Amino acid sequence: MATAKMGDRVKFNFTGKLADGTIFDTTYEDTECTTDACETDDCRCDTDGCGCESGPVELVIGEEDFFPKVEQALVGLAPGEKKTVTVSVDDAFGAYDDEKIFQVDRAELPDDLVPEVGQELVITGEDDESFGVTITEIGDENVTFDGNHPLAGKDLIFELELVEIA
């Protein structure tokens, strides 16, 4: 049976987990995620939660459309075979950075924004670059934002299943 190699177009399913078993993303239908990370634009899911993007991911191995370590783990697999790979913090979303936590005076927020803890927003910085933040605290005068990715500081464990070599 043929096995996947660099440059092959493949389809694969995956379930992404944290070390404690929390599922943060999956391509399998009817799998419920247990973190808010699935509700971000950086993940594959919409407001229905994980598993909403049912069906396998398709990519060319080596083009780095996914985590490179995951793509490399697909090499040598035949359709139907499974493998588990861990993507370290450094190869995923990096270490959690306390310097990405900042406060904004409530008077500087848009009038129509009603901030809520846990709310995710896209804001534009001084250099007109947009980035995602999560509201972590709301005070009388300030709102605290966290600019770290929800999965920053975490190793990511991917359970892979090669579906097809196209």
Image (cartoon, rainbow, N blue to C red):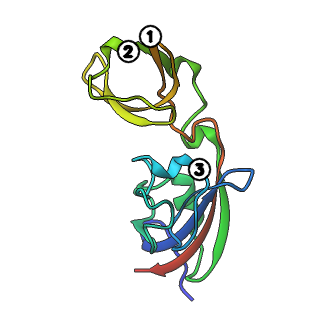
Structural distance between the alpha carbons of marks 3 and 1 = 29 Å
Q: Nearer the viewer, residue 115 or 79?
A: 115
Task: Name the residue located 50 percent from the left edge and 72 percent from the top edge.
Answer: 12
The residue where tag 2 is placed is: 106
From the viewer's perspective, is the residue at label 3 or at label 2 nearer? 2
Residue type indicated by callout 2: Arg
Instruction: Check contact, mark 2 vs mark 1: CB within 8 A.
Output: yes
Task: Name the residue located 33 percent from the left edge and 12 percent from the top edge.
Answer: 107
Q: Nearer the viewer, residue 35 or 42?
A: 35
Percent of width and height locating residue 44? 43, 57
Q: Could you say whether the residue bearing mark 2 is in a helix, strand or loop?
A: helix
Residue type indicated by callout 3: Thr
Percent of width and height locating residue 105? 39, 11
Task: Name the residue located 43 percent from the left edge and 54 percent from the top edge.
Answer: 64
**Callout 1 environment at 10 Å: few (<14), some (14 to 19), or many (20+)?**
few
Measured along the vertical axis of the image, is residue 116 above or below residue 151?
above
Measured along the vertical axis of the image, is residue 156 above or below residue 133?
below
From the viewer's perspective, is the residue at label 3 or at label 1 nearer? 1
Q: Quadrant of residue 59?
A: bottom left
The residue where tag 3 is placed is: 35
Residue furthest toward the right?
20
